[in-house]
Image (cartoon, coloured by chain):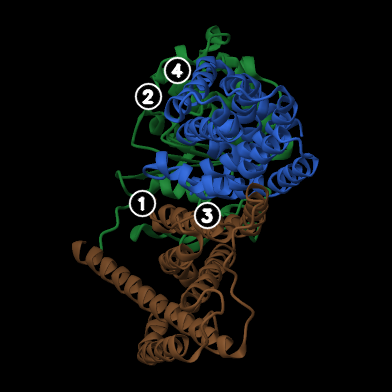
Amino acid sequence: MINYFANPSRFLKMTEKLLPWLVRLTILFFIVGIYFGLFYSPADYQQGDTVRIMYVHVPAAWMALACYVFIATMGALSLVYKHPLAGLAAKSAAPIGASFTIIVIITGSLWGKPIWGAWWVWDARLSSVLVLFFLYLGHIALSYSFENPSRGNKASAILALVGLVNIPIIKFSVDWWNTLHQPASITRFDAPAIDPSMLIPLIIMALAFFLYFITVLLVRIKSELTSQKIKSLNIKMIK
Amino acid sequence: MNYLGLVIIKDVKLALQGVSDTGMTFVFLLLACTLFQFSIGPDQALLMKVGGGVIWVVALLATILSLERLFITDFEDGTLEQYFLSPVSLVFFAIAKAISHWLTTGLLVIISAPLIAVLYNLPSEIFLPLVLSMFIGTPILSLIGTLGAALTLGASRSGVLMPLIILPLYVPVLIFGSLVIYNAMYGHSYNSLLMVLIGLLLITSALAPWATAYALRQAIE
Amino acid sequence: MQSLKIKNLECNRNGRTIFTGVSFDVTPGRILLLSGKNGSGKTSLLRILAGFMPPTTGSVVWEDKKFTDKRQRELPSVLYIGHSNPVKLGLTVKENLIFWAKIFGHGTGVDAALDQFGISNHSEVPASYLSEGQRRRLTLARLALDQPISALPSLWLLDEPTWGLDPEAVKTLSNLTIDHVKNQGMAIISTHGSILDKYLASSSDRYSLTENIF
């Protein structure tokens, strides 16, 4: 099936059919998820209503990481199997992943302010996510830095694989750093013990983010393929 | 293996001929430390607290500066293409480059570190752990840096691009390296931290040369 | 006699088609002169044959084995000389040649090679003192080294080798190339119609790359 979609026009046809449904599903899931999150789930006994940020923060974090794994996988596919859409998928997904990390950082900061009293305290989790954000930026910058776009894709594919190996190492090192430097425990705002009434909105929001990712990814790939088509038509016209 | 020696010797010979480069790197190290002192202020207690971290950050910056021109000449004059065609694997070439980079920059950092420690009023019991952590850590910096230089070979504006790419990858070394000094200063054991650094070195030396060779292959196309 | 068969080679870079439908055979014993205007793709063709990049389509076959993947091919061995001169300015002239001789397993003959190209009196001088033309001679001196038996037959890919060379050195080059193909070697030389063509006239065939217009 993967090879079937290597043909750009078949891929474009498929996306034409799928996109309207994906958009509707994404909006639906977001509406349901936010509704549940805001009204139907309990407030936290310690943190009050601020815990509701979790419904955006946590799924965004999951997706930020999943997106990087996706990029690394697509990178590997493009290097090993030279699948033409794989490199394109990685390039298109990177900015989406980067924006997820921004959401994690901003919501994390908002969540933490009432507890910490400051906007940013270099807590372990947020610091790791910040490094992940830089990994994304590096990937994006590298893929656009070459005249020959396929060279950019190949270089950033290698970088993504190296980054993937590094992510657990970075997480490990940041955790160690945090526990050694802050022995006085600052309340880490872990998601409280998950009650089913909290789990359901969380999963709904996770699915919403996932659908959002797929939708925007397909839109980006579609527009990239279209602009490539336009470019090659232009070149033909010049000659 | 004979080949590895040949390539290393040639590279080191050429690198050492730029003795002025090595001198300039040394001056940069001192200069950067001085800048921190000016911006933080002469509060001795504070300087002692940040000293370990500053040394490591400055070592990182010096490493990155000398990575700029690592592959450029070989790329532009066709030497890289010849290595590709030769019986020598590009992996050997990558290893040789990392080694010669370390010999010209990493060693310098190791030697300068105690001097900088004195400038920052760090207690003498940290000298040994400092040098040890640098000794294990700087090869990691060279290996990852070589990979970064290979990835950005031929890119436009690679000046800022390469640091952007490798600095996130340097975070673990930075953290553990500075933690060694931090622990030593407060009398805690740092052996497990050194072990982690050795582990990082092993992982990096196993993976980085292959990724670098792959990236060099891409650059030739 | 085995020959290198090139069929329907096409090269697309950055969305541009550089050449298409290129087919010819390279036989040991004859030199192939590659001609064509600027931009017709001579350099790209030589680089594809060297294995630096894969062709977009088409095949290059030697004894039924695919030739353009360096990992897949053993023989013929490839000696490629491009536009630039891989000369390290910090090493002496002799050290430069010795380095390549060792890496490629050429063994002995460094002094003789330098002599053939008229730069042996500069052997111990840092290469930075050489002029561009002399550095070109140093690069070409590799062709005068003894070829290791294990690397025969070998394919010489020379991209405008006479660039910056004076007539004396061009004569040396042509003699070397003629000797090389007489010993079952193969050679493809891209040319702009210099005196080299005249020297090689009787031992060579021509293939012309035309600029593609779509």
Nearest to the observer: residue A203 or residue B100: A203
Q: Are marks 3 and 4 in contact (CB under 8 Å)?
A: no
Q: Is residue B99 left or right of residue A3?
A: right
Please give the letter of the chain rendered in blue.
Answer: B
Disc 1 marks which residue? Answer: A147
Q: Are marks 4 and 1 in contact (CB under 8 Å)?
A: no
Q: What SS does tag 2 mark?
A: loop
Q: Amino acid at mark 4?
A: Gln
- Decide which of tag 2 and tag 4 comes sooner along the chain: 4
Please give the letter of the chain rendered in green.
Answer: C
Please give the letter of the chain rendered in brown.
Answer: A
Residue B204: x %, y % from top left: 68, 46
| Distance between the alpha carbons at the discs numbered 2 and 3 | 51 Å
- The circle drawn on residue A131 is 3
Q: Residues within 10 Å of mark 3 (few under 14, many from 20)?
A: many
Dot 4: chain letter? C
